Amino acid sequence: MKDRQILVRDVLLLLAFAGWGLALPHYGSEFVVSMALTCLMYVALSSSWGLFCGSTRYLSLATSAFFGIGAYTSAIALEHLSWLESIALGAGLAALVAVVMGAAVLHLRGTYFAVLTFGMTELIRHAVTYFEKSVTGTVGRVLTVVPDRDTIYLTVLGLAVLAVGVSIIVRRSRFGLALMGIGADEQRAQTLGVNTRLIKIAGFAMTAAFAGAVGAAMAVRWTYIDPLTVFNPFIGFQTVLIALIGGAVTLWGPLIAAIVFSVLAETLRLQAPQIYMMSLGLLLILSVLYLPGGLASLRWATFGGWWRDSRGWLRGLKSKERDRG
């Protein structure tokens, strides 16, 4: 397919996804809408994470830090600002923290970068906890100004659609090419004139802005928040798992995996949390071993290849048994 045809296809798929999301509250039950809200949250988080980390191959574990910053910003600002202003402020503060964090750690790669981003997440969580205890005298906040369900849902839907839409645009821009170049060979990208430091910080801040905006929107869903809830490392880890299993480099992989994970989460997590965690681990192992491109890389040819490989493996076992006999 030509690039223009791919662009038209992606835009039509995005419009279809947006239409499905808009129609869902009108015919879905409260449970279905709640599950869809979780799904949309992870679509926005994993799509924006994959846009930077999938392209540059930097494994960031700071998503929960930006999510928590957005959530606390919304909890404080909603008493003084409008809903959209609170969302924008949460996104802006998360992006600002990402610029400072990125300037400090984006010169590292691999395990060092992942560990440092996780360590900074914990540092921010403990700093917020200390501030709450020292200044307010309590840990946690009750949200007295809470929008209605439809406002929250439409906001998170808008953020999910925006995250995918930005991914479509950025992947076709010079900025997106620079991110891909950094992931392929950072030193070579530098020799070609790419300001890799600035590009990485900008991409990291863009990811953080989406996480902060989603955190600001989702905070009111709980009505009461504390650092352990909104800075929960599980939010960051699950975002990474969704992106990797879906295909972090691809456009639609994180969206597909977010839907699969949301269904698994609501089906298994409350009734059998151990099976849910085992399912996550199993999906990750299978993806790494047999589907490195993620769920988005599945094709009919992939199943044919698995079938041929399994037949070859069985023939090898039979030939070994005959040799022993």
Image (spheres, rainbow, N blue to C red):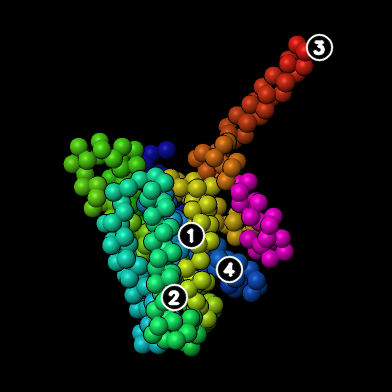
| Eye-nearest disc, 1 or 2 | 2
Q: Callout 1: helix, strand or loop?
A: helix
- Left or right of 91, for residue 293: right
Residue 237 vs residue 3, the one in the foreground: 237
Is residue 274 one of those drawn in magenta? yes
Of the residues tagged 4 and 1, which is closer to the observer?
Answer: 1
Marks 2 and 3 close (CB-CB < 8 Å)? no
Question: Do residues under tags 2 and 4 come within 8 Å of each other at their CB atoms?
Answer: no
Which mark sits nearer the N-terminus, 1 or 3? 1
Question: Measuring 72% from the left and 23% from the top, which residue is drawn there?
Answer: 314
Q: What residue did someone put label 3 on? A: 325
Nearest to N terminus: mark 2 or mark 4: 4
The residue labelled by disc 2 is: 129
Q: Badge 1: few (under 14), some or many (20 or more) residues near its Cα, within 10 Å?
A: many
Name the residue beneath numbered marker 4. Answer: 24
Residue 200 screen position, x and y as percent: 29, 51
Q: Main secondary structure of the magenta part?
A: helix
* 98 lies above or below 279: below
Kind of residue at badge 1: Gly
Q: Which residues are magenta?
A: 265-283
Q: CA distance from mark 2 to mark 3?
A: 68 Å
Residue type at mark 4? Answer: Leu
